[in-house]
Image (cartoon, helix red, strand yellow):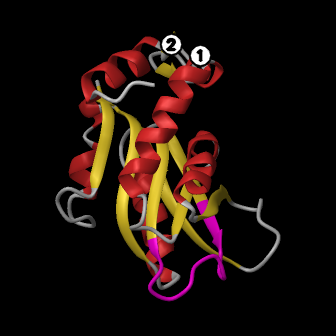
Amino acid sequence: MTTDSGELRKLLESRIRDVPDWPKPGVVFKDISPLLADPVAFAALVDALAERCAGRVDKVVGIEARGFILAAPVALRARAGFVPVRKAGKLPCATHAQSYELEYGSATLEVHQDAFGAGDRVLVIDDVLATGGTVEATIDLIRRAGAEVVGVEVLLELGFLDGRARLAPVLPDGVLESFIVV
């Protein structure tokens, strides 16, 4: 397992594939499937995320869909609960909903109204930070449910889309961390 942050970053970068013109022309999709298929790289990422949150969170939120894949094993290793934030209409019980704008459209996210206890400390995990809309909507949902966001971790930050600036008004300094910034 890789413990040095520079080595970890190199390992993770080497397992992310660029897919040009997907889902539409001009977009370069960052495919993490090769990273997930590599047990060494995947374990190193999960271990690093779990280490960053161990003992300081009650719940780990994964944002649909690739955020689920990363957040669930982190929650397990950190001995925290896992909470999925899903696209509208996918959760079976009463939900809080939040609409937002994406880099190429709009969407609505939902979370169960009973997913968090008052004062729960929550870590949000997603695969990519682009414009920040998805993370911002998730933060709003968590706070409306009475919980506190203590961290946001993303595998890959698309710096040229400046999602970090969008999140600056809703997150204190040092709360958002990225493994890779492109």
Query: In the drawing, does residue 94 fall left or right of residue 85?
Result: right
Pick out the residue farthest to the right: 92
In the image, residue 143 above or below residue 110: below
Q: Is residue 114 covered in magenta?
A: yes
Q: Residue at x 43, y 55 (%)?
A: 135
Mark 1 secondary-structure assignment: helix
Question: Along the polypeptide, which appears first: circle 1 or circle 2?
Answer: 2
- Residues drawn in magenta: 109-121
Mark 2: give few (<14), some (14-19) or many (20+) Cα within 10 Å.
some
- The residue indicated by pointer 2 is 17
Does the CB distance between marks 1 and 2 fall below 8 Å?
A: yes
Amino acid type for the residue under numbered disc 1? Pro
Q: Residues within 10 Å of mark 1 (few under 14, many from 20)?
A: some
Q: Main secondary structure of the magenta part?
A: loop
Instruction: Quadrant for the N terminus, please.
Output: top left
In this view, the mark in front (1 or 2): 1
Name the spot of residue 104 as percent of width and height, x first: 48, 37
Three-letter amino acid code at disc 2?
Arg
Extreme-bottom residue of the structure:
118
Residue positioned 21% across, 58% down in the render: 168
Q: Secondary structure at mark 2?
A: strand
Name the residue carrying label 1: 34
Whether residue 176 sits left or right of residue 135 in the image: it is left
Whether residue 159 is visible, yes or no, is yes
The residue closer to the viewer here, 155 or 85, is 155
